[in-house]
Amino acid sequence: MIAPILGLILGVLIGVASKVVIMNDSSIKKSGDSNAYLVHAEDILAVMNELNVAGAEAVSINGQRLVGKSSVSCAGSIVMVNGERVAAPFEILAVGDGDILQSALKFPGGVVDNLAPWGIEIIIKKEAEVVVPPYTQTVLWKAPVLEQEVVQ
Amino acid sequence: MRKNHFLFALTLICVLLGMIIGIQYNTVKKQNSLTENQRLTELTATLKKVQDEKDALQAHLEEKEKIIKDYENGLNYGATVENLQSEIGQLRVFSGLTEVRGPGIMVSMNDSSIKKSGDSNAYLVHAEDILAVMNELNVAGAEAVSINGQRLVGKSSVSCAGSIVMVNGERVAAPFEILAVGDGDILQSALKFPGGVVDNLAPWGIEIIIKKEAEVVVPPYTQTVLWKAPVLEQEVVQ
């Protein structure tokens, strides 16, 4: 019982109804702070969180799977996800109910709505099948684990 | 007499100027060597860190090679079962199904107690603030993070639900207590750096207390996951 669940958490997932989000920097050339027209780490974090809120079963960005230890941070002109460099265009894959995921992103005042004025290009596609890759980083644990209680 | 006076002033200025240039030259020289020394210690520290990491990875590799050898031998069922069990244990830790104890920090966030006119929303802790703090802790290498008893896993989400916040689909409310296991100093400075999450919330009077703890206990993920997506491959990468 535990093994297949763990496999799901680490393994490759193929969804029946799923979602692809492509985010790219704005192509609008305007005066003012050019930072406002770029996709930032916070925007990616917001999109991935919103997908999880909508019940996504697995989420990845440019090949980096979202796990408990995942982090998204700004590193100059690129973004670091899971400690790996990723750059625009960002392709976020999510397995789950396509319609729910889509409306979670598109609702008025939601993440897509907030980025629209800056010309950030966001394409949301419902796909019959997406392949979310597994987490590939090596984790070197330092904290001692006292209890291995199984709750699942 | 008048000419002498002028000469005297000129000499004085020249002497002063010479002294200033001399002092300046020496200071700049000293500073340069100081920064060079700093760079050197920084590089040495980085080298040591990378070497430690290399050693740890080497040990990891040897361990994996031993496991492969066990599998290849085939006959040794006991060792195979043992290996599989230890692998399941590791995966459980990774997926957040176990309690994690260790040194770390406790971050307590509470709504602002400042009573001001204007939009009262600005003085509350929002879902995005919590998400930002938890992400920053992960950036700083936290090994396990939880908020008010909800463990942060891959499927975790933080969303606003009126006056409360939903984490992992459960209601949590202020004061928020975020626990993280990891290097306390690194975690603390990741949150406190200028322009960081704490800095951004300070003007609104949001009360953030960061405490370094010798031991924090991060609880396991307790929700039931109903998977709907079919799994094609069960490749274990860890």
Image (spheres, coloured by chain):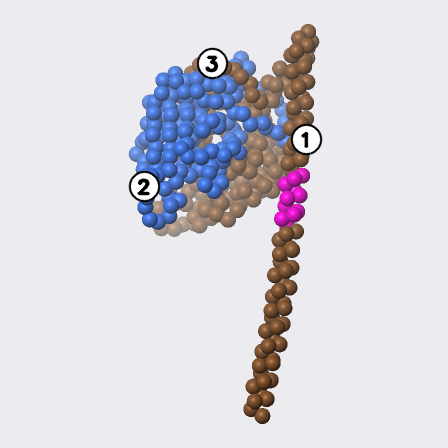
Chain colours: A blue, B brown
Q: Residue at x 42, y 39 (%)?
A: A40
Question: Which quadrant of the rendered structure holds the N terminus of chain B?
Answer: bottom right
- Write down the residue under mark 1: B55
User: Residue B47 lies in magenta, yes or no?
Assistant: yes
The numbered dot on residue B232 is: 3
Does the image show residue B148?
A: no
Chain on which label 2 sits: A
How crowded is the residue under tag 1: few (<14 C-alpha within 10 Å), some, or many (20+)? few
Question: Which quadrant of the rendered structure holds the C terminus of chain B?
Answer: top right
Query: Magenta part of the protein: which range?
Result: B38-48
Residue B150 vertical placement versus A77 (above, below): above
**Contact, mark 1 vs mark 2 (Cβ under 8 Å):** no
Measured from the top left, where is residue A72 in percent x and y? Answer: 48, 35
Residue at mark 1 to residue at mark 3: CA–CA distance:
35 Å
Between discs 1 and 3, the one toward the N terminus: 1
Query: Which of B199 and B141 lies nearest the eye of the viewer?
Result: B141
Q: Amino acid at mark 2?
A: Ile
Residue at mark 3 to residue at mark 2: CA–CA distance:
41 Å
Chain on which label 3 sits: B
Q: Amino acid at mark 3?
A: Leu
3 vs 2, front mark = 2
Q: Amino acid at mark 1?
A: Asp
